[in-house]
Image: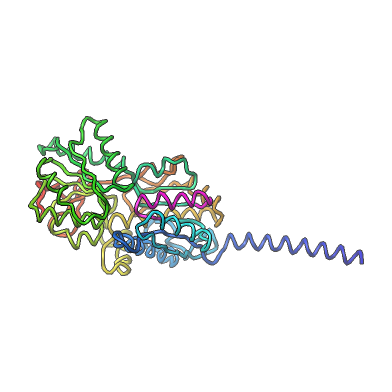
Amino acid sequence: MAFKHIVGLISAAAISVALAGAASAQDQSAKTVKIGMVLPLSGNAASAGTHGKAAIETAVEIINSGSGGFGNLPLTNNAGLKGLGGAKLEVVFADNQGSPAVGQNQALRLITEEKVVALGGAYQSGITLTASAIAEKYGIPFVNGESVAANLTERGFKWFFRVTPVASDFAKIYLEFLKDMKANGIKTDNVAIVHENTEYGTSVASVITSVFKDNGLSIALDIPYAANTTDVQSQVLQLKDKKPDVVIMVSYTSDAILYAKTMQALDYKPPMIIADNSGFSDPSFIKTAGKLTQGLFNRSSFAIGAKGTPTFLINEMYKKKSGGDDLDDTAARQMQGFFVLAEAIDRAGSTEPAKIQAALKATDLKPDQLIMGYKGVKFDDKGQNVLAAGLVIQLQDGENYTPVWPKQLAKTAPAFPYKGW
């Protein structure tokens, strides 16, 4: 009996070790790795959300198929995640409906019910703010590719990582662009800024104002408005009355379209308009209002590239999922953020949140490993990519943006004045 008891104890211990080993093996070679993405799939920003979804789905197809042909872009030459035994990526999408509260609840559901190992999203900065707070509470990595509100990386969070350039980076680009244009004889002294009143518009306008002021250029006119409004006549009439040299617009899609149509209706054309990306890069804006806003400047960090290049090939794949639309800057930044997260999970060789977090902190990607025109991806202690970069593009002769500044990245020279319709 004693012998049997000893054998029983040994067997129990062996089973325990075997189970532990199996758990470890499962972690190292899981069949699927679940990632949650919170996006506006309904509401006024639904177009941006559905294009972001198509971008993520394209990235998943590229990684899971391992078909190659994408240069030095990580994870494209092996089917699935090599560091996890070829595990395939599975993305669970959640609709934030354009609401910070809904976005927060969806993040909670993805973590507690779907058991995702990491999160991404949520397009609108105000929703990224709430969704990432839930991820922080639960100790789940949250990688953002597209939200630019300054305070997202100022909260002392340890699980939040942002790949995109931020408001201060773009403010400096606008400033240097205007200085360069002034040196070439373009009047840029009187600047107005028009912005929606959620986290995105308010914070970006504040940062632009601060950066300009620090460099001796004040914002002469600041016009906030209610997000998702149905009437901007008073704002446009105010611009028409004050006659600024430059109008900087910070708006989501429905507002951007409304401003374009109202400017045409009231016959208002400022000498120069600079858009802060967002709604102005949305394909639905280009289709609806592109012909009304010829000469519009915008910011970007993405170019499709010449035929046969990785970005060209990726764009061809993306178009099959987007209904024929090309990758715009926002969707491309979302895709880049997802690639960064997937690369970190692969390098971690684990689905344990703490190991993914450590891998993200150690990220050091070079320009030729990216689809964006960044100088690389490397996070500081706040989780901000310190190597993010951008350029100025312009709507010229149709419905396509063209790089126009800085000169070394330009395909053509900036055209003046703003043509409109």
Q: Residue at x 87, y 64 (%)?
A: 5
Give the farthest residue toward the right. Answer: 1
Q: Quadrant of the C terminus?
A: bottom left
Is residue 309 in view from this perspective?
Answer: no
Foreground residue among 360 and 330: 330
Foreground residue among 233 and 160: 233
Residue 158: horizontal and vertical position, in percent? 49, 44
Q: Main secondary structure of the magenta part?
A: helix
Q: Is residue 23 left or right of residue 206?
A: right
Residue 98: horizontal and vertical position, in percent? 34, 57
Quarter location, residue 43: bottom left
Foreground residue among 405 and 139: 139
Say if the magenta span includes residue 286: no
Give the farthest residue toward the left. Answer: 267
**Which segment is the magenta one?**
121-140
Q: Residue at x 20, y 48 (%)?
A: 410
Q: Quadrant of the N terminus?
A: bottom right
Foreground residue among 212 and 199: 199
Residue 16: horizontal and vertical position, in percent? 73, 61
Residue 147: horizontal and vertical position, in percent? 35, 50
Say if the magenta span includes residue 128: yes
Q: Is residue 392 left or right of residue 27?
A: left
Quarter location, residue 23: bottom right
Is residue 412 in view from this perspective?
Answer: yes
Above or below, 212 against 247 in this view is: above
Q: Is residue 31 left or right of residue 128?
A: right
Please state the total of marks drawn on the protein image. 0
Above or below, 67 against 198 in this view is: below
